[in-house]
Image (tube, rainbow, N blue to C red):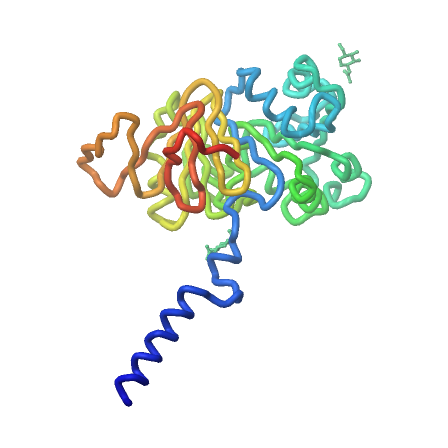
Amino acid sequence: MRIITLFSFALATTTSLAFPSSKPTPRDTNSTIGPEKGYLVIVGGNLQSESIYSRIIALAGGPSASIIVVPTAGGEPTYGQNFSTALTFRELGATNVNVLHTYDPAVADTDAFVAPLITADAVFFGGGRQWRLVDAYAGTKTEVAFNEVLERGGVISGSSAGASIIGSFLARGDTSGNDILVGDHTVGFGYLKNSAIDQHVLVRNRHFDMFQILEVQPELLGIAIDEDTAVVVSGNDAEVIGSTYALIYDGGFWSRDGSGGKYDLPEKKFYFLKEGDRYDLAARRKIISSRAQF
Ligand SMILES: *[C@@H]1O[C@H](CO)[C@@H](O)[C@H](O)[C@H]1NC(C)=O
Ligand SMILES: *[C@@H]1O[C@H](CO)[C@@H](O)[C@H](O)[C@H]1NC(C)=O
């Protein structure tokens, strides 16, 4: 009798594991690493490829989509509507491109400043120093409106500093210089959760810099994107497009030729993805199947 009772208990336990209750686990509460709706297009600086601009325009809804370019990271005294990135979007066919800029968080907290974002389909953060975006917009109505672009299914994009701001941890956020990985500003806008995003990685020999962040916050997914290359995120899917590589720091290793990686420093692993490669942000692994699609 006692044995039967124990067996029944074991069976009940097994059954409850096989059919879990609907109560969300901690993992369920972060169901996506990327935004639940909308897209991220994260560019590693020196954006040249039409294919990347065109992807932003297409994901935003096409040439008539409202694209807001935010040059604030650049640090110039003023910006006009003909800021270079805005001109490039227009040259490539976008007809509704506006530049939005302030350094003053009091201005960024006004309805008048936020107005163009209310109907925006895409936001593009230009390059410079990423902490300037934090100082101008963090905690303001503008930051809320950036989030609402995603909630409407729109696009958040950015290059260089504008890429790093997309991470939850702000890489190279120090006001004294861009060579300090963990600086006096460490909180990004966090559109890609649990991540740190570096840029210009190959051309500036930054391959090993990400480990300075991962030593402090090992739970983060590190993504370091080279110039003129983008990581396009939809939910938990990331796709690499553009001319060179995105480096992944997830504690694992993957190689195109199937090799295991011969590391002298096994705790300092990273690997390269190129155009067409896809990555599962939730499982933290390279998607192998050629059939995998968004
Ligand atoms: C931007 O460039 C266009 C085309 O050259 C020009 O017509 C317009 O006046 C310029 N706008 C500003 C604000 O400089
Ligand atoms: C969920 O996401 C938040 C925000 O990025 C993060 O702080 C937290 O650690 C995540 N929780 C889990 C269980 O992954």
Residue 228 in view of the camera: yes
Looking at the rendered structure, the number of numbered marks drawn on it comes to 0
Point 25% across, 30% down: residue: 258
Residue under the image location 38 percent in, 31 percent down: 247
Left-right relation of 280 to 266: right
Q: Can you say whether 105 is above or below 21 in the image? A: above
Of residues 11 and 182, the one drawn nearer to the viewer in this rendering: 11
Residue 183 position within the rendered picture, expressed as x and y whole percent measured from the top left: 45, 43
Residue 219, given in percent of the width and then of the height, sits at 39, 50
Looking at the image, can residue 161 be seen? Answer: no
Q: Nearer the viewer, residue 239 or 264?
A: 239
Vertical placement of 3 versus 86: above or below? below
Relative to 53, residue 178 above or below: below
Q: Estimate the x, y position of residue 275 in percent, counting from the top left.
A: 44, 23
Residue drawn at (70%, 33%) of the image:
121
Q: Quadrant of the N terminus?
A: bottom left
Rendered image quadrant of residue 259:
top left
Question: Picture quarter containing residue 200?
Answer: top left
Q: In the picture provided, is 44 more to the left or to the right than 9?
A: right
Q: Quadrant of residue 145?
A: top right
Q: Identify the residue shown where x is 51% and y is 54%.
A: 30
> Is 218 placed left or right of 236 in the picture?
left
Ligand 1 shows up in the quarter that is: top right
On the image, the x and y values in percent for residue 20 come to 46, 66
